[in-house]
Image (tube, grey):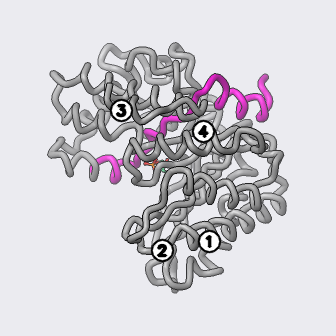
Amino acid sequence: MQTLNEIANSLVTGGKGLLAMDESTGTCNKRFAALGIPETLEARRAYRELILTTPQLGVCISGVILYDETIRQAAKDSTPFLKLISDAGIVAGIKVDKGAKDMAGHAAEKITEGLDGLRERLREYFQMGARFAKWRAVMTINGHGPSWSCTEANADALARYAALCQEAGLVPVVEPELLMAGDHSLARCGEITEKVLRIVFGKLYEQGVALEGMILKPNMVLPGSACLKQESADQVADATMQCLLRSVPAAVPAIMFLSGGQSPELASARLNALNVRSEDHRPWALSFSFGRALQQPALEIWNGDDKNFTAAQQALAYRAKCNGAARRGEYTPEMETK
Ligand code: 13P
């Protein structure tokens, strides 16, 4: 049986990264509604089939993160999605948190739920074939940053989730996300991200999580989306590296970034800059675990219509190729004007 460290390393070998397709029913419906796609079980299944039957998906994608609804579904010809995934040489992962809920007594802050019954759910997912899992905590940067109690409670839940995953033989993907929304500066995002990561790694230590058998999925250090000053990809890469070098132990095998609402092109350019500029001093592999930055062009082209199926798959394969190149430090903006 593969060790947790071997599974984690296999997710970042060969210039590959993760495709997050684990939108909850509510989030998936919201994305469909924005494009006028019917918010139905069948539309969600058909879209996920489109993703998983994309030719050559496994060339740049090492693992896919599924949602509970999706891991149990099958293609139109009855092939289980899990079989499509393993036939493509891709590792199946699963989102196991139950979503970010309003935190009592903390206006506008969220706490991620889902620890109750998690041990049993992880056992089932492992038996189904999943080898890694994801839990997302979400925090906002405002005047005072996320509160201590929100940061602490979310970090504690992430660490307890990670320990349960390792007990069940699944690599935990630990995702503490500072949202891009807001007018904060790049420096402020760096300061808060560093603080949150230090707290998360303190909790992981307390819970006995083996760092060699986990993956960190953080936000890049970015200026807020409403900040007037938007730094270059190189500046973002340098700020992100400074933050991560200060807060992420070298024993962690891989850091796989979320895209967080960046445009697909910016996400690729920044990941590329991160790999190019840290080449001689990074202790971990740096790759992607993107949702929107991989899927959005394909979703817009598909638009719920079967006649766009192939064009949508080509768009997804293209974003996977761009991010595979960025993961190796070989992406160029010219790739976007093919
Ligand atoms: P985005 O890349 O769209 O932020 O999604 C990644 C993810 O898995 C969020 O939990």
Q: Earlier in the sequence, mark 2 or mark 1?
A: 2
Q: Position of residue 22 (x, y in %)?
A: 45, 42
At label 1, which amino acid type do we have? Answer: Ile
Q: Earlier in the sequence, mark 4 or mark 3?
A: 4
At label 3, which amino acid type do we have? Answer: Glu
Q: Nearer the viewer, mark 2 or mark 1?
A: 2
Q: Which mark is residue 184?
A: 2
CA separation in Å, label 2 and label 3: 29 Å
Q: Position of residue 171 (x, y in %)?
A: 70, 39
At label 4, which amino acid type do we have? Answer: Ser
Residue situated in front as seen by the camera: 126 or 174: 174
CA separation in Å, label 1 and label 4: 22 Å
Q: Is residue 18 magenta?
A: yes
7 left or right of 64 in image: right
111 left or right of 275 in image: left
Instruction: For the N terminus, give its image quadrant.
Output: top right
CA separation in Å, label 4 and label 2: 25 Å
For the record, the magenta segment spans 1-29
| Kind of element beneath mark 3 | helix
| Kind of element beneath mark 4 | strand
Tell me if label 4 and label 2 are in contact, CB under 8 Å. no
CA separation in Å, label 1 and label 3: 33 Å
> Compared to 164, does 298 lie above or below?
above
Question: Pointer 3: what residue?
Answer: 336
| Kind of element beneath mark 1 | helix
Q: Which mark is residue 284?
A: none
Residue at position x 37%, y 48% in the image: 263
Q: Which mark is residue 192?
A: 1
